[in-house]
Image (tube, rainbow, N blue to C red):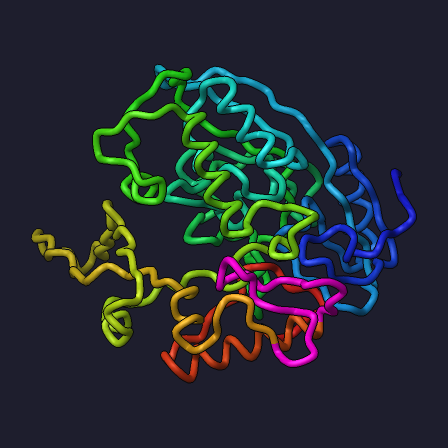
Amino acid sequence: MPQVTPLPLKQLTTLRTGGAPARMIDAHTTEELVDALREVWAGGDDWFVLGGGSNLFVGDEPYDGTVIRILTNGIETLASPNPGHVRVRVQAGHNWDDFVAWTVETGLAGVEAMSGIPGTVGAAPVQNVGAYGQETVQTLVEVELFDEGDENPVTVPAADLELGFRTSVLKNHYGDIAPRRAVILSATFELEMVGHAERVVRGEQLRAALGLDADQAVSIQWIRDHVLATRARKGMVLDDADPDTYSAGSFFQNAVVTAAFARTLPDECPRWPVAPDPNPVQVIALAEFTGAVPPLATSEPDVKVSCGWLIEHAGIGKGFHLPRSRAGLSTKHALALTNRGGASAAEIAELARYIRGRVSAEFGLEMQPEPVLIGVEL
């Protein structure tokens, strides 16, 4: 068993908080990862897996449990049943942006707009990571999954993960335990073989973010380069020299609200309609069926609203920090809570509570944290 001397979690998380766990295991292969999980589950100890540490907010006290670091690596190319496409199976510990860079170099489209997102491939399906109109759900085919307490891993289709806006059945949301306690061992994606030629960008949100006309053609390398530059300007590409990147990315996720609630917000608040289910299912009990199918009830689609805009218009600007606190908002991005250098988890939590309360008081919206919180309360 590859047990190692535990490192303080502040050295392994991008928010740079967290004490050392009681026990730490480094899993460099799938076999080591499976064996480590079996042992920890059999012992009944508290545990969690750690990839890139970019979506974790860990408390100051030492963690009384086992941390398993997923350090597996590798990409395998597979055949696809769909012409013009290829499938790739990627190990869970593989760096996400390294994977995206590989797809672009290989001429495969489907994840290039998610360039620069920190973390590992195994973490991407857990919260259905996305950027500029691309999301994991659009290309994910299946995952190799090991459910807690089971004998062996299983291959699970993407549909079984119930991927939604920054969520899945595998994610621990603040205040809730994930419906399915399991660890991703690998993920398989289906990507389009487009080569390196220029082509028209399909996604309206991506075109808008990159300033492209509807019929303007660019290569996937051009998209990657410009997405990385855009994210860097927002302090969303990890850089040891820039404290604005000492964060967990967007600390609060943009809220999906009803159309009626969205109308209570100022007209200037950016918003985007959430696409309704194109194939709604209507179930009619056989005993109640009269031979006629009633029309489906229709409703306005939900709306995604910008929590960054709400924060700033609640009077909390970029670079804000509480007196004598070493935690503050990024100077570039109002959704990123940052560790300005040596901040404790308590300081970051205090700032998060303050911002959350101000937005709630001003707009009646309770923002939800996006990172997984371990040993921290807001």
Q: Position of residue 363 (x, y in %)?
A: 36, 79
Q: Please count the marks in the image.
A: 0
* Residue beneath the point at 71% across and 49% down: 49
- Give the position of the C terminus as an image quadrant: bottom right
Q: Main secondary structure of the magenta part?
A: loop
Q: Residue furthest right?
A: 5
- Does 330 appear in magenta? yes
Q: Position of residue 3 (x, y in %)?
A: 89, 43
Q: In the picture provided, is 45 more to the left or to the right than 184? A: right
Q: Nearer the viewer, residue 29 or 242?
A: 242
Q: Nearer the viewer, residue 279 or 347?
A: 347
* Residue beneath the point at 65% across and 52% down: 242
Instruction: Decide: is 96 above or below 358.
Output: above
Place residue 47 in its image quadrant. Answer: bottom right
Q: Residue furthest bottom?
A: 361
- Give the position of the N terminus as an image quadrant: top right
* Residue beneath the point at 73% across and 58% down: 16
Q: Position of residue 210 (x, y in %)?
A: 35, 40
Find the magenta span and give its range. Answer: 322-345
Place residue 339 in its image quadrant. Answer: bottom right
- Does 323 appear in magenta? yes
Instruction: Decide: is 15 above or below 109.
Output: below
Instruction: Decide: is 117 above or below 335.
Output: above
Q: In the picture provided, is 311 more to the left or to the right than 336? A: left
Q: Residue furthest left?
A: 292
Q: Nearer the viewer, residue 344 or 292?
A: 344
Q: In the picture provided, is 268 more to the left or to the right than 192? A: left
Q: Position of residue 172 (x, y in %)?
A: 58, 59
